[in-house]
Amino acid sequence: TVMKDKPIGSNNWAVYTINGKIDKDAANLVFGGLYGGQGIFYFDHFRLWIEKTKNKFEEIPLPNGDFEADTLENWHDLKNVNFATTLTTDTAFHGSKSIKIDGSLFKKQPEPGENDSAGSYALVNGIKIYYESYGTGEPLLLLHGNSQSIRAFKAQIPALAQKYRVIAVDTRGHGKSGEDGKTYNYDLFAEDMNALLDYLHIDSARIVGWSDGGNTGLIMAMKYPAKVKQLVTMGANVFIDKTAVDKIVFKEIDRQLKQLKNDTTSWGKNRVRLLNMLLTEPRHTFDDLKAIHCPVLVMAGENDLILPGHTKGIAAHISGSTLLIAPKETHDYPSENAASFNKAVLDFFEK
C-alpha cells in the first residue's frame, strides 16, 4: 500500500497495515508516518512483524513505538519541514500518549515555475514569455528541455542565485508561456531568447541549457554571439539521427505519439507538436559550431541519451571548449545529482 495515495482525513483513529518485503541485504529499516500541508497529525502504536516462516510471524520490539516514554530520541523529521513535534496526552490510540505533529502554521514556499512573486511576462516575438528572476549579479539565463518548464531547474536556482541574477524561462509553448501556432524549432526558440534579453536590456548573459535548452543555447551562441558571455550545454545535440541520440529515444517518441493519437485536448495537440520537433530538429552541422567563440562547457552523462561520440563532436568543433562526460550520470544529471552538476557549472563560470 502506498499511503500517500490514500491520505487520512479523519478526526478519528484508524488502523492501517502496510505489507512488503525487506531486502535480504538491508542493514537498516526506516519507517514512520507521512504527513503534509497545514493540519495537526497524530500517530501512535507502531508495530512490526516479520514472517519467519509461511504464515508464522514474530513481532519485533520497536524503540518507543507506542510513544509512552518521555523522549522522541528514535523519531526524526526526515524532510526537515520543522513542524512542531511533541509527545501528547491529548489523545491516544493505545496507552496514554501519542506523537503530535503540528503543521497548522506551515506555509509551503512557492517552487520555481509557480512563484508569482518572482515571475513576470514579456511580450516578445508576438507572444508572451513567462520568466522568473532570482538573485542579483550578472545575468544567467536558464533554458529547460522538451515539454519541461522552469521547474526543471528547481535544484539549480537556489545555488546559482547566490552568485548570479538567474533568469529562468518557460520556452514558447511550455509552462506558462504562450505560442502562436508557428512550427516549433530551436532557431525560433533562440530568436525568442534573443528578443527576451533585448526586452530586459541585457547586452550579454551566461546561459545554461539542458537538453533542448542546450540546443537553443548553441544556436544563440552561433547566431547572436554578442549576447552569450559563457555557455553551458547539458545533453545537447546539433542534428538528429541515430549517430546523435540513442535509438531508445525514437522508440519512446513513437510510443508517446501513439498514446496521443486520439487526444484532442489543447495539451495533447501541443505535446504532439513538441514530440514531432524532436524527430526533425535541430538541423545544424558540426561545422556550424565553428561560429561559436565564447567559452563553452559541453556536458553530458556517461549514460546519456545523447551518444558520447556526438557530445565529443560538439566539443571538438567549438574552439577552446571544455568537455565533461559525467561518470555514471544520465541525461537527467542536473536533477539526479544536482550538487555535482551545480559545482561543475559554477566552477566553469568562475574560471
Image: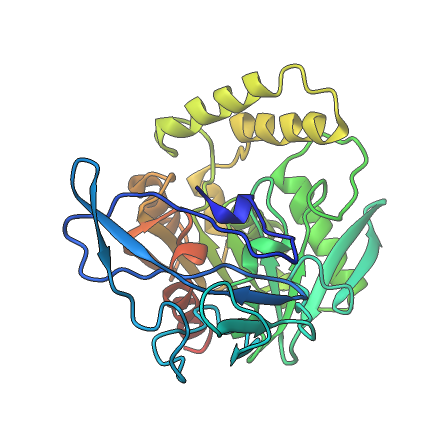
Q: Image height check: is 224 above or below 94?
A: above
Q: Look at the image and tell me in which quarter the N terminus lies.
A: top left
- Outermost residue toward the bottom? 70
- Count of residue discs: 0
Say if 105 sits above or below 182 in the image.
below
Q: Nearer the viewer, residue 137 or 10?
A: 10
Horizontal side, residue 106 vs residue 144: left or right: right
Residue found at x 37% / y 28%: 248
Q: Looking at the rendering, in which quadrant would you find the C terminus?
A: bottom left
Q: Pick whichever, 70 or 196, lies toward us.
A: 70
Q: For residue 324, what is the image quadrant?
A: bottom left
Q: Is residue 50 left or right of residue 226?
A: left
At 36% from the left edge and 67% from the top edge, which residue is drawn? 65
Q: Residue at x 67, y 44 (%)?
A: 189
The percent coordinates of residue 62 (x first, y second) are 29, 66
The residue shown at (47%, 40%) is: 238
- Considering depth in this image, is 186 or 152 the residue closer to the camera? 152
